[in-house]
Image: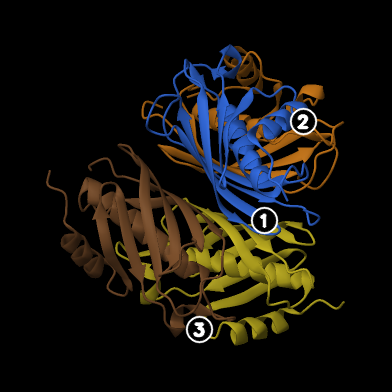
Chain colours: A yellow, B brown, C blue, D orange
């Protein structure tokens, strides 16, 4: 099976989630990097990025990394996600999620995502997520 | 210290998060119930409620339950959140989050949230979250 | 299919895990209660019960609750476990784990376990765990 | 403040946890590597390493990595731990836990641990843990 290219995954993401602000920066080799522009809508009081935005980026990064390996199978679903918030993301930087898959089994995938404020070295949050992969895949 | 009423917490939530669709159904006794209307914006392909919406409801439920005990201290911040997705929430029902605090210490609170599709018995997801409480509180 | 009795599950546990100190207090109705005697071996410096003992009790409680529903299928395996430590368990009380299954699907079970020091009201720790159930089951 | 050497941490571990089978392989630079010999006592039916052994190695790796940074402060306590089990560890290989701290704040540390069967490339499990650091530290 030919694996989807970055352009194909980006097109799929845009079609499947027309409202998403996530863009695919890189994909392949059991990993994916996702970028999410930050605007007023993504902020919460105190001028920091809201938690659900970080979780969204992590979830998309996991999804894209998995689809990059198994092909575009829109039925993969998140089964669990654990996030640890570590630093306050500044309001004026995009969020970058870097996912690495640690396991890609027949029915279960496990990956971790480090979330960064663009241009800064230390992660603002860390996610471990699991995805259930449909049998047909 | 007098604890905030449900109306005071609802007003605070509306002021602090003007875009939130979460409403306070109940609060007190180390617990809180939050409701989130579901519309097209909250759905993902396949006609199910998106994961970040569920996480948002859980996070707000934890926050309101904590503020209901310690007073309106806007500096409490989520430090971790673990969600398990268990059933596909139907597209046409609001999401209800029922939070119970299990620990409310001086610097750390731990709570769990069962998430339901309104009117259905079995939870669609379950969250455990931790909050850091600022010293001044 | 006839579901296993408490005595059958206790016998299975003893046979499968001959070294376990866990005993089955109750099982059935998608739940299980497990008891673990605490001695010098289970303590860590400062006179508190070690974390791995608490995790063991939670894991056994999940396992027994699942077997109580699906029958004695020794192939169910833990896929994830999240524990939050909330209070220091005193050295002189047994640990009681009370598990409730939240989902029992064909391939995945999700449950939570509240862990107590025997005789005390507030939980010392809380666990959410997931189990993979083999297809044949 | 002079940071403890590997030998000092190993001596502390042996004194504080006289029954532990964990040994310190490496420590420093916000990381630690721990090794745990596997014998009959650590196995469960089916000839695999028991989950609590893996959790113990992860917990010790986090603890040693933190003490390597803040000095030997025996009051740091685990507040949460999330483990994902990914592959069945063979019975005849030691378990190696490699911890990297992602955050080391004044009151909270967050780290991840990859757990391996010695000599094999793919991790058998992955842990994210949080530690509370006492004020005096």
Q: Which mark is residue D106?
A: none
**Residue at label 2?**
C16
The chain containing the residue under callout 3 comes to A
| Lower sequence index among marks 2 and 1 | 2
Residue A19 position in % (x across, y down) = 50, 83
Residue C65 shows in the view: yes
Q: Which mark is residue A19?
A: 3
Please identify the quadrant where the N terminus of chain A is shown: bottom right
- Residue at mark 3 to residue at mark 1: CA–CA distance: 31 Å
Mark 3 or 1: in front is 1
Q: Secondary structure at mark 2?
A: helix
The chain containing the residue under callout 2 comes to C
Residue found 64% across the figure and 22% down from its top: C21
Q: Which mark is residue C108?
A: 1
| Contact, mark 2 vs mark 1 (Cβ under 8 Å) | no
Q: Secondary structure at mark 1?
A: strand
Residue found 56% across the figure and 65% down from its top: B87
Tell whether B54 sits left or right of C24. left
Front residue (pair A120, D127): D127
Residue A20 position in % (x across, y down) = 52, 80
Q: Quick one: label 2, few (<14), some, or many (20+) residues within 10 Å?
A: some
Residue most toward the left? B2
């Amino acid at each position: 099976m030919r694996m989807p290219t970055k352009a194909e995954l980006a097109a799929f993401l845009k079609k499947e989630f027309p409202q998403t602000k996530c863009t695919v920066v890189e994909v392949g080799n059991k990993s994916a990097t996702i970028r999410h522009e930050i605007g007023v809508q993504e902020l919460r009081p105190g001028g920091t990025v809201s938690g659900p935005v970080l979780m969204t980026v992590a979830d998309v990064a996991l999804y894209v990394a998995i689809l990059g390996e198994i092909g575009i199978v829109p039925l993969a679903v998140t089964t669990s996600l654990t996030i640890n918030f570590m630093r306050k993301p500044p309001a004026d930087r995009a969020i970058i999620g870097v996912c690495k898959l640690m396991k890609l089994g027949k029915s279960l995938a496990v990956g971790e995502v480090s979330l960064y404020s663009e241009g800064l070295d230390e992660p603002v949050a860390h996610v471990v997520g699991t995805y259930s992969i449909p049998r047909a895949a």
